[in-house]
Structure formats: C-alpha cells, structure tokens
Amino acid sequence: MYRCHPPESTSRERCISLSWCSGCRIYTGTMVHVPRKEALPDALAALPLDEQDRLRRSEVRLISYLDRRTGDETP
C-alpha cells in the first residue's frame, strides 16, 4: 500500500493497494482506507530519488521491483 495524497490533503486516508501473483504475473490495484496516523513502510526509501520516481510512474515496473524483493527482510 502507498499513500497518493500529501499529508495536508483531506484525502490522505485513501491509499493505493497493489496485489499480485508472481507465477501468473497478474496484478490488481484498488483504493483502500488507511487511518491518517498509521505509518506505511516505504519499500522504495533506500533507492535514489530518481529511481523512486521512475518506479512510481509505472505500476508494471513497481510490481516487478517489489516482486524481486519478496523474501527480503526489509520492506
């Protein structure tokens, strides 16, 4: 899940949730409610900003990156 609205937005609690199957390469995304105070881990935080931006602009690239990270100890 990730937040798509800035902290000051009234829509802050609307987040995007992605689910996928590594075997069949099918994914789905939906809007979900996450309380404003709940912190979400940022799986891209360790990447350079330009790489974060590149991944965030494409769900296909983002899911591919996250799929490769499956099993890592850090989110």
Image (cartoon, grey):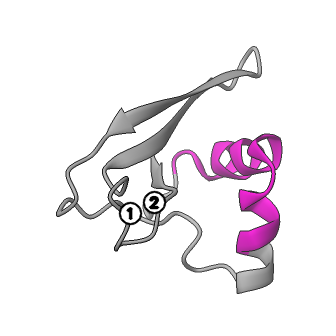
Residue 62 image position (x, y, % from top left): 72, 50
Q: Give me the residue at 37% from left, 53% from top.
A: 11
3 vs 40, left or right, is right
Residue 18 picture quarter: top right
Q: Give me the residue at 79% from left, 57% from top.
A: 57
Vertical order, 64 against 5 (above or below): above
Q: Give me the residue at 70% from left, 42% from top.
A: 63
**Magenta span:** 52-71
Residue 50 picture quarter: bottom right
Give the amino acid type for the residue marked by disc 1 in the picture. Answer: Pro
Q: Mark 1 sits on what residue?
A: 41
Q: Give me the residue at 45% from left, 60% from top.
A: 75
Camera-side residue of 1 and 14: 14
Q: Give SS at disc 2.
A: loop
Vertical order, 73 against 60 (above or below): below
Residue 20 image position (x, y, % from top left): 61, 26
Camera-side residue of 15 and 61: 15
Give the amino acid type for the residue marked by disc 2 in the picture. Answer: Pro
Q: Give SS at disc 1.
A: loop
